[in-house]
Amino acid sequence: MDLIQAIIMGIVQGLSEFLPISSSAHLVFTSNFYKVFKGIEIVESSNQEVFLDIMLHLGTLIAVLIFFRKEILEILKALYFGILKKEHDENNFKIGKYIIIGTVITVLVAFPIKDFAEWLVFKPVIVGILLIFTGLLLLFSEFYSKKITDKKELNLKSALLIAFAQGIAALPGFSRSGLTIATGLLHGMDRVTAARYSFLLSIPIILGASMCYPALTLDYSEVIKYDWTAIVVGTVVSAIVGYLCIKYFIKFVSKFSLSVFGWYCLITGIATAIFFSVV
């Protein structure tokens, strides 16, 4: 791994974490394209590459925490007064409650498929096929959503379904934001509401993964030997690009359809599946 690779990966993570195009798929594609370009066999990632991936996700976590800082503080305050003092701010307390429930559901769904998800990192053809599914789901959700004239607010049923979608999205190729937003649309939510809740729901999962994975699996005598300049720069790039991506994506979905991302996933999935099956 070098500085240029870390910067490229940071840009890719910052863009693809919040756009409904699967950050995990794009990190797999970028890493494996880089290996093909360098003439390296696509077998496995080094521990340093795995650690960089964690840090890039931490960068996008910082982005979402900064962008939604006011909403996060209001939700935390509502949970505090709601749980300890039995004083409910209905909307923020409800969102906070659904995020907690949704995080539990996500873990219960994602944990059993963790090993399979890690195996897929080295199978870019299958990841491409899953990205095709993401594209088809986005296209269908936009088509179906237009038929729903009476838009719904977030409720327990939709929160559970969105959480299940987030758990399944542990598989590279399934876009976390794509599946969660599409699920919200299929349940009658408008695009902005579904997107904002999707981003807020991602916070505990990204935070937990960023803390738990290093604590349980990394050899810290090895970590200190990593290229920390590349890792830090990649993380900062990921945070900056991620923040800008959230800002403009929210504006985009308030006016335009997600179909363009559906077509992008469809075409990219087909192209990468063909490319890596030949290579």
Image (cartoon, rainbow, N blue to C red):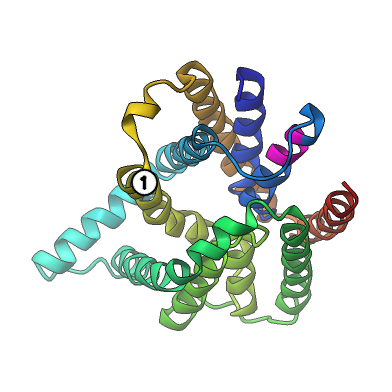
The picture quadrant where one finds residue 46 is: top right
- Amino acid type at circle 1 is Thr
Residue 192 in sight in this render: no
Q: Which residue is mark 1?
A: 217
Q: Is residue 39 left or right of residue 172?
A: right
Tell me: residue 273, above or below residue 93.
above
Please give left or right for residue 31 compared with residue 197 in the image.
right
Q: At 64% from the left edge and 69% from the top edge, which residue is drawn?
A: 182
Magenta part of the chain: 30-35
Q: Nearer the viewer, residue 206 or 246?
A: 206
Instruction: Name the main secondary structure of what is drawn in magenta.
Output: helix
Estimate the x, y position of residue 129 in percent, counting from the top left.
78, 64
Residue reaching furthest left?
85
Residue 215 rendering spot, x and y as whole percentages: 30, 44
- In magenta stretch: residue 118: no
Quadrant containing the N terminus is top right
Pinpoint residue 156: horizontal percent, then vertical percent.
41, 80
Tell me the residue at 77%/38% (across/down): 33
Numbered-mark total: 1
Residue shown at the point (45%, 71%) measured from the top left: 112
Can the viewer see residue 163?
yes
The local crowd at label 1, few if under 14, some if 14 to 19, many if 20 or more residues have their Cα within 10 Å, is few
Q: Is residue 23 above or below residue 110?
A: above
Which is more toward the observer, 58 or 276?
Answer: 276
Q: Which secondary structure lies at badge 1?
A: helix
State the residue at coordinates (60%, 78%).
Answer: 188
The picture places residue 77, in percent across and down from the top left corner, at: 22, 54
